[in-house]
Amino acid sequence: MSRLRPTRRRPDEQGATNPSADSSSPARQRLAEQRTFNPSVVGSSSVPKRQPAADGGLNPETTGLRPLASFRLALALRALAAKAFRLAVLGIRTSGLLPKSIPDGKGDDRQLAARPPQAQVMVYFSDTVNGLYQIRPWFRPLRALHGVHPVVVIGTDSRAVRAIRKESGLPAYTISHYSSLDRLFAQSPVRLALYVNHNANNFSVMSFPQLVHVSIMHGDSDKIVSISGQTRAYDFTFVAGQAAVDRLAAYLPRFNAAERCVIIGRPQAESVDAAVPASPVGSPRRSERRQVEPGQAADAVPLVGGSRQVEPGRATILYAPTWEGGTPSAAYSSLIGLGRDMVQGILADQRFRLVYRPHPLTGSRLPAFAEADQAISRLVTSAAQANPAAGHRVSRGGPATADLAAADLLISDVSSLAIDFLVMGRPLAITVPPDPEAVVAPTPLLETTPRLGLEQLDGLTSFLGELLETDPGQARRQEITRYYLGDTSPGAATRSFIAACGRMISLAERDWAAARHNMSRGLALPPDILGSTAQSATSAGPPASAKPPEHPEPSQPPDSPERGEM
């Protein structure tokens, strides 16, 4: 006879023990109404409405949903929203609507995996089209390097990479996944990585120890950004001249500038030197200057005059202010405070022709500088329309070397253009930053170059006329040109750049071979620790047949070259 098991009653069937068991209870009625579908009451006010809970979720008392069901529904809705967001971003990327300042991440990862480039040098450019001005000056030196040591450019924005590939003629690819870097370096002979800026994404490449990482930057100046602490992260830094070494040694703590700086000159500026060699007794005659059309490459401009119908008696003044800077301490721009008054004074004097060249990032951080830039551009454009023969113009986007080559006098803020212009042997004036927060350290260039500040605005045209006629700082500038720019003889900087890259490749191959050799042998305990470990094992009574561990001899990597050879 089977044993009968008592029937376990559900809580809602226990009558008096559960008040909700009464079919007339409000909660019971609401639950019954939600479980019964009645088309006649759809849309009527009798259908209970879902009320949000106090925490913003669904209230199980009014929805009939249990907490677990509510949680699952929330997860599903979140996953659906994330998928919709990804699809929206993908649609924006493929349609080309993504803002220029955001990398689109449309990569060539599959192509790189299938056919890795057989290059020895990689230029990593993790920026967008807004930062192309940083790598463009390097196109000519990189093409020269490519003829000796194959070069590949790797970026993270397909729009910027397309422009680099088209303008430089170098192989260039976009990556969208970090793992692609690992495959690239494992399957290609890349041993040298070059960086033209301090983009935070550079560290994704700097994690690979088989490469030598070198900062080449996009300009050498007396700005505070030239002594950034990020310089310490690279194995080496290529600099133009001894001035950069001394600057880093004096102003960047815990950085051995003598060992980690390699002087190569300014190969990016050699097209300036190739324009018209500076006369040892003065500036070249204006009739010998290049007449450079807007946007024309410097190395494509013939050395002839009169390619534009301009008045021959005017001196060309290039006003090239820098941008507002990323921080208040780097606020060297003269656009607000000096720019408008200077431009109006120059345009009003028939002795001068003005070329206005703003920095590509002007106004990117502070809208007031964008407004000042637009106002000055309108002034120059109006003056050019009123008198086309004067030759006033606004220069944007073209190579800076072309504008430098055509200038009789440069008005610059504290920036790399002032240093690049030294090789021309022509008058130069550097503005005093109107912003009191700008950090300006005394340097040989700033101490010997005429400064242009608020005090000079009243007699601006007389000040500029005197510079053009007498150029009082010429002799001193000639003395410091090599200090800032190294060897300025034609082609010397490019040859030095290629040779330095070759040494870095050899250094990387040697050091990585030694590291791989050490990896194959593994790490060993130092003798003092090994001895104490062996004594402890002996006191514990090891078997008589046990042999003491053998300590492998430390690996001996090849001798390092003298640091002076770097």
Image (cartoon, grey):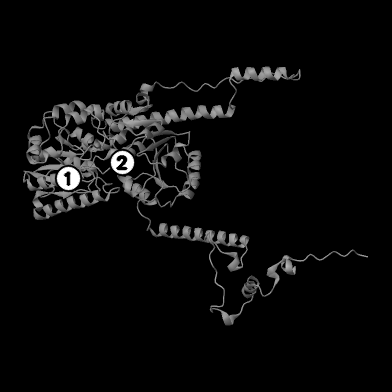
554, above or below 473, in the image: above
In depth, the one of 409 and 114 nearer the eye is 409
Q: Which-is-in-front pick, marks 2 and 1?
A: 2
In depth, the one of 427 and 402 nearer the eye is 427
Dividing the picture into quarters, in which one does residue 247 lie? top left
Quadrant that contains the C terminus: top left
Please, what secondary structure does the residue beneath circle 1 have? Answer: helix
Instruction: Inspect the image, locate mark 2, and give the three-letter code of the amino acid beneath it.
Output: Thr
Where residue 118 appears, x then y in whole percent?
44, 40
Quadrant that contains the N terminus: bottom right
Where residue 100 appears, x then y in whole percent?
35, 52
In depth, the one of 336 and 299 nearer the eye is 336
Where residue 6 appears, x then y in whole percent?
83, 65
Please, what secondary structure does the residue beneath circle 2 have? Answer: loop
Crowding at dot 1, Cα within 10 Å, few <14 / some 14-19 / many 20+, comes out as some
In depth, the one of 267 and 87 nearer the eye is 87
Residue that carries the numbered disc 1 in the rendered image: 339
Residue 166 in sight from this viewpoint: no
Q: Answer with left or right where residue 543 lies relative to residue 273.
A: right
Q: Residue furthest bottom?
A: 40
As drawn, the label of residue 327 is 2
